[in-house]
Amino acid sequence: MPRVTLHDVALEAGVSDSTVSRALRGLDKVDEGTRAKVKDAARELRFSFSRNASSLASGKTMRLALLFSDALNTWFDSSVLQGAYEVLSPAGYDIIPSTVSTDFELNSFLNRLPYDGNVDGVIVCSINLDTAQSKALKKLTIPVVGLDSRTIDGFDASVLMDDDTAMDDAVGLLQGLGHQRIAFVGWPAPGDFRFSSQLRAGAFMKAAKRLGFDDGSVARIDLGKMNDYRSPDDALSAAAARLLALDPRPTGICVEVDGFAVPLIAELKRFGVRVPEDMSVIGFDDTDVAAAVEMTTVHQNPVEMSRLAARKVLALMRGQTLDEAHSVLRPMLIPRKTTGPIL
């Protein structure tokens, strides 16, 4: 049986060979009705379009790099991957996820980008870049979009979460419930560079100062790196012990991420601390487990954030100008049962 060609698809769809090529490559100079007709004809004839041949003809790889600072199976990163896929896959792009956990790995990734020619764009997720790394991004000739990156420096576009407003809301809730001694509990970093979520501690401290808390009534617990502990359970025990050793002890706390806040509540209860009667707890993310245990938390939607970042990078890869290059999204505080007034 003779092999089906691109020209056969063109005859079946009643369009030119070049229109078939543009439609199947996801280019934007084809109306959606024609694109659908071409795809139907290709499916009917079981035509397999060569991505490599398309790349050579167009000068595009039809691939995008998605860079993470943590394991791909975390709630946030898997949600980001889902959102990017929903936007980029229908446009004909393959996503190449990569993870880095050290400055050496990050710098190696950035140094390879100008030379391997393997991707048409990059989304950098939740990594707080230093000055040299931002300069490396600026030298790239492909679009780079920051997602939850805490800075716009070096990025052609970005999607940021307004942590300052989030912490204003969180501290304001504790203050409104009558808490006069509060604390922020960080999450042990899985790598050796700063992650975007770690900047929430600074936002918390600034919010407390703006709302009138003095230095003696606000504490910050930094647990360092996960490698400093034998296990995650040891890190939880250290967090609980340091909280309970504070004098005066805080009656309201905010924890960097839900994934650490939920087990920390259990650890506090093991030491006889009632939540929220003795200590109110606020998380950050609004993961499914936060809702399951009815924990007060700050809601963000990484799937929607990723969709927005993907739409930005897709437009830039197509040579389009963005109406809004840098977007700042406001999270929402979700009060539940782990916060309450002082009894």
Image (spheres, rainbow, N blue to C red):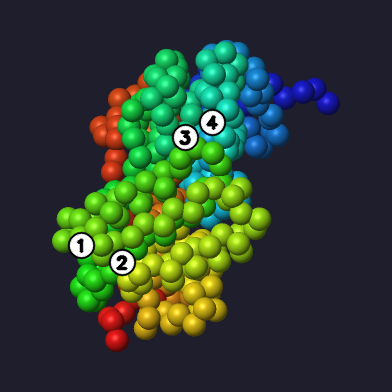
Residue toward you, 27 or 130: 130
* C-alpha span from label 3 to label 4: 14 Å
Q: Position of residue 298 (x, y in %)?
A: 36, 61
- Report the residue marked by disc 2: 182
- Report the residue marked by disc 3: 124
Q: Earlier in the sequence, mark 1 or mark 2?
A: 2
Residue toward you, 250 or 151: 250
Residue toward you, 25 or 102: 102
Q: Earlier in the sequence, mark 3 or mark 4?
A: 4
What is the three-letter code of the residue carrying label 2?
Answer: Ile
What is the three-letter code of the residue carrying label 4?
Answer: Asp
Q: Are marks 1 and 4 in contact (CB under 8 Å)?
A: no
* C-alpha span from label 1 to label 4: 36 Å
Q: Residue furthest bottom?
A: 343
Q: Earlier in the sequence, mark 2 or mark 4?
A: 4
| Disc number lying in front (1 or 3) | 1
What is the three-letter code of the residue carrying label 3?
Answer: Val
* C-alpha span from label 2 to label 4: 33 Å
Mark 3, secondary structure of its residue: strand
Mark 1, secondary structure of its residue: loop
Q: Are marks 2 and 4 in contact (CB under 8 Å)?
A: no
Tell me the number on the disc at residue 213.
Answer: 1
Give the side of residue 50 with respect to residue 180, left or right.
right
Q: Are marks 1 and 2 in contact (CB under 8 Å)?
A: yes
The quadrant in which the N terminus is found is: top right
Give the side of residue 67 with respect to residue 163, left or right.
right
Q: Residues within 10 Å of mark 4 (few under 14, many from 20)?
A: some
Mark 2, secondary structure of its residue: strand
- Report the residue marked by disc 4: 103
Residue 169's image quarter? bottom left
